[in-house]
Image (cartoon, rainbow, N blue to C red):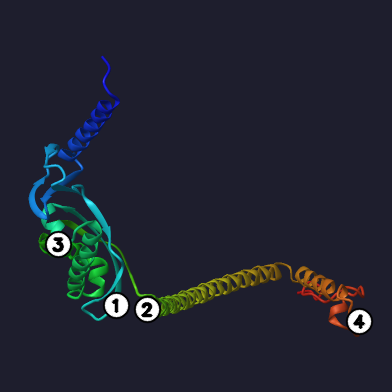
Amino acid sequence: MKFPRSLGAIGVLIALVAIVGLRETLYVVDETNQAIVTQVGEYIRTDQQPGLYVKLPFYQSLTYFDRRILVTDNAPAEYLTLDKKRIVVDPITRWRIVDPFTFFITVRDESGARARLDDIALSAMREEIAQNNFIDVVDKKREAIEEETSRRSFERGKAFGLEVIDVRIRRTDLPTEVQASVFARMNAERTQVSQRYRSEGAEESAKVRAEADKQRTILLAGAYEAAQKLNGEGDALAAAIYANAFGQDPEFYAFVRSLEAYEKFLNSGTTVVLSSESELLRYLSGSRPKTPAATGR
């Protein structure tokens, strides 16, 4: 049995309508999103648990919202600290949608939420920074400032169906026009410190050198004194030996001393004119000096 072509077209049309109707009637909420259903602009319900849901086709509207944790990179802003110093802070905010309906009627979508969060987080951050000194913002109380900013932002975010998890300071910096003067001042301070260290080092070096020179002088004086003492003792011992030798044989002693004198002036290249009767030449002239033995003594 053959059906008219018109009946086949009607069947296809009915199937298409059924598919469209099912698509408009059934919808799925998964783990990453949540949805609100409105009817002619009026709120009906919120579906936040994962599953399959039903709505009236073409009469009720469906709007999805992300249920995951979202991140807003707030624009860097300039703040004034308690000690009247300017600082640029770059915060970052983590948040999520907990009340889709309130979120929908207040900010509509994520772009509106991010704009609102900029106002919330930055204003809370401004209030906290204004109550702390520059060094506290940069170092000592940074975590406390972040915690208090997060708490303030959390309270204010409730009005928009948002849960602000935390607000963190990603980076702090000085305004561009202030950096040059700050760096110049830091350089001057470091130069002053280095000069002080150099002067202290020079002073300490002078003390060490003076002490070393003092010890050197003392050591040299002691060595000179010991040398002179040894020289004196040596000269005394030599004189004693000479005296003892002279006492034993005066003639031989006189002969040796004359030879020493001859060696010194004859090898010096100096011309010496002496009388033939000179005592110095008595051993060269062949004459023998008179001694106590020659005189019968």
Q: Which residue is mark 3?
A: 106
Q: Which residue is mark 1?
A: 86
Q: Earlier in the sequence, mark 4 or mark 3?
A: 3
Q: Residue at x 91, y 81 (%)?
A: 271
Q: Name above or below for residue 61 compared with residue 26.
A: below
Q: Earlier in the sequence, mark 2 or mark 4?
A: 2
Q: Which residue is mark 2?
A: 178
| Mark 3, secondary structure of its residue | helix
| Mark 2, secondary structure of its residue | helix
x, y percentage for residue 131? Answer: 17, 75
Query: Which one is in front in this view, the residue at disc 4 or the one at disc 3?
Result: 3
Q: Residue at x 65, y 69 (%)?
A: 238
Q: Which residue is mark 4?
A: 271
- State the CA–CA distance, disc 1 to disc 2: 8 Å
| Mark 4, secondary structure of its residue | loop
Q: Earlier in the sequence, mark 1 or mark 4?
A: 1
The residue type indicated by label 4 comes to: Thr
Q: Earlier in the sequence, mark 2 or mark 3?
A: 3
Q: Based on the displayed image, in which of its 4 quarters is residue 114 positioned?
A: bottom left
Q: Earlier in the sequence, mark 1 or mark 3?
A: 1
- State the CA–CA distance, disc 2 to disc 4: 93 Å
> Viewer-proximal residue, 24 or 220?
24
Q: Quadrant of the N terminus?
A: top left
Q: Residue at x 87, y 83 (%)?
A: 278
The residue type indicated by label 1 comes to: Arg
The residue type indicated by label 3 comes to: Thr
Q: Name above or below for residue 166 compared with residue 183.
A: above
- Is 21 displayed left or right of 188 in the figure? left
Query: Which one is in front in this view, the residue at disc 2 or the one at disc 4?
Result: 2
- State the CA–CA distance, disc 1 to disc 4: 99 Å
The residue type indicated by label 2 comes to: Val
x, y percentage for residue 173? Answer: 33, 69
